Amino acid sequence: MADFGLDCRGLVCPEPVIRTKRALAEGRKSLQITVDNETARDNVSRFARTSGCEVDVSEIEGGFVLSVTRAGSAADESAAVQAHEKRAPRSGSVILVTADEIGKGRRELGTTLMKSFLYACVEADEVPATMIFMNSGVRLVTEDDETIAHVKTLEERGVDIIACGTCLDYYGLKERLASGRVGNMYEIQTMLISADNLVAL
Amino acid sequence: MTDSIRLTSYSRRAGCAAKVGPGDLQDILSRLPEESRPELLSSTRNGEDAGVYLLSEGLAMVQTVDFFGPMVDDPYSFGQIAAANALSDIYAMGGKPLTSLNVVAYPCELELDIIESMLRGGYDKVHEAGAVVVGGHTVHDEELKYGMAVTGVVDPARMTTIDGARPGDLLVLTKPIGTGILATALKADFISEKEIGEAIESMCALNAGAAGVLSRHEVSACTDVTGFGLAGHLFEMLRAGNVSAELWADEVPLLEHALEMASMGMVPEGQFRNRRYVIGAELPMNDDRDDLLVACIYDPQTSGGLLAAIGAGQADAAVEELHGGGAPRAAVIGKVTPRSEKLLRVRHERND
C-alpha cells in the first residue's frame, strides 16, 4: 500500500516530475501518482527508474496510476534525489502575512508578487516553522486556488499554517478555509513574541 | 535585480515546444483556401519553411515569421535565439535575409530594461546576418513572447525546397539536438543555465554559415529542424519528396546532458505530439537507452540546425567543410531510400 498519494492530473510537464522528486526527497518509500497524459506517465516513470525506484503503471479512465516504490536502501543514496534534498522546517522561524499582496503599489503587481513568493517558498530547500495569515491575507488560504495549492504543499512539508479567526469571520470566509487551522489573537501574539526569526509581509 | 528575474517563469511552454502540433495544424490548413498563382513558388501545403514569391526574373522574395516564449532566463540570449530561429527559415530556403520586424508580447510587470536587453539580442543577431530591423509590433500579454517576421531574397534557380530528396542521398544535420529537453530541465531547476551553455550557444548560432557551405554542394532538399523535432521535420521532407529514409540514431549529434536529462523525466509534452504525427515509423525499442534516444529524435527543437539531403558522393566532404564553417557538430545521420511502406526506419549504426 502506497504511503503517499500524488494527484498530478491537470499538470503540465515537468511539474509531475518535480512533485514526484519532492515526495521522494521527503523520504516517502512508496508513492501512488495519478497523471492524465502519456508524457507525464513516461517522464515520471523515467525519473523514478533513474532514481532507483520500481515503477508499475496501470491505466485508468482518463489517465494512468503509477505505483513507485523504492527498490531498497541503496536507492536512498540516489544522486537524483539527494541533489535537491529538502530540509525540515526551520524551527523558530515565523512568516506573518497581513495582506493578499506584497507591498504598496499597483494591485496587479502586488498579488503577482505574493503568488510568486508562496511558490518560491514551496520550491525553497528550507521552509519556515509557522506561517500566519491575517487580514486580507486569509484570502490566500480560502479564495485563490493557486495560492491554496502552494500553502497546502507547505503544510505537507510540515509548516504550521494558521489563519486568523477574527479575519475569517470578518470576511465571511471561515467555511472556506482550505489549508491550515484557525488561530486566535492570544496564540498568534505568543508565536510572534517567541519567534527567533520573524518575517512580516 | 535583473539576475533574479526568471524569464522562463513568464512562459508555460518553452520555445518551439509551444508550436501547435503538426497534425492539428494540417487539419486546420486543409480547410482553408490553398493559395496558388504563377508568382507563388512555394507550396502552402507541404510544410515549406518560408513563402517564396517571384518578383522578377532571377529574383524572388522569401518571407517567414516565428515567435515564442522564453526557454532561457537571460533576456539577451533569449533575444538572440528568437532572432536566429526566425532567420533560419530564410537560410533553409537558400535565401539571404534583408529586413526584419520585431513581434513582441509582454506582461506589464516585466521591467523595461529586460525588454530592451531582449530586443538588443535580436538586433545584434539580425545585424550579424547582414540584415536590418525596420520596425515591429508590441502588445501586452500574460506571457512573454518574442520573435520576428523576416523578409529576404533568393534566386529561384538556387532555391532549396523541402521536396527534392532522392533515393541514395545522404542526410546531413548541422546542429546537435536536445534543446527541448534541456529547456524543460532548466525550467524545472534540474540543471543550471551554465550547464546548458552548449545548447544556448547552439540556439544563438545563425544557420548562415551552414547554408553557405551547403550552397556549394549538391543539395536536393533542405529544411530547418524546429518544433516538430528531427523526426517530424525529416518526415515532412520524406512525404514531400515521396521517398523513405533510414535514420542512424548513434550518428545523430546530441547536446551535452540531453540524454541524462531525458532519463530524469525532462521530456517536453511536444515530443509526444511529434511522435503521434510521424505515422508508421520503425523505432528501436530494446532498452531504456533506446527510449531516451527516441525521445531526443522527437524532441521539439528551438533554433535547430539545417537538415539537408545531399548527393552521396558529396555528403562527407560537405560535413568536413561544415565543421570549419560554423557548424562544428554537423554529421551524416542517415540516407534516403526509395519509397516503401514505412517512411522512416530508425536503426543504430551507419549503413551507407
Image (cartoon, coloured by chain):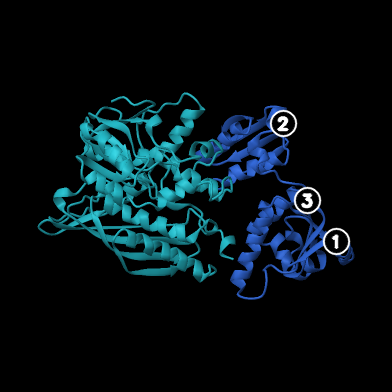
Chain colours: A blue, B cyan
Q: Which disc is residue A195 wearing?
A: 1
In the image, what residue type sits under mark 3? Pro
Q: Earlier in the sequence, mark 1 or mark 2?
A: 2
Q: Which residue is denoted by mark 2 in the rendering?
A: A1
Residue A83 in the image: above or below residue A121: above
Residue drawn at 65 percent across, 56 percent down: A119
- Label 1 element class: loop
Label 2 marks which chain's residue?
A
Name the residue rendered at 68%, 52% in the picture.
Answer: A124
Residue at horizontal 64 percent and vertical 33 percent from the top: A68
Work out whether B268 lies above or below B85.
above
Tag 3 subunit: A
The amino acid beneath tag 1 is: Ala
Q: Nearer the viewer, mark 2 or mark 3?
A: 3
Same chain? Circles 2 and 3: yes
Q: Are marks 1 and 2 in contact (CB under 8 Å)?
A: no
Q: Which residue is mark 3?
A: A89
One can see residue B269 in this view: no
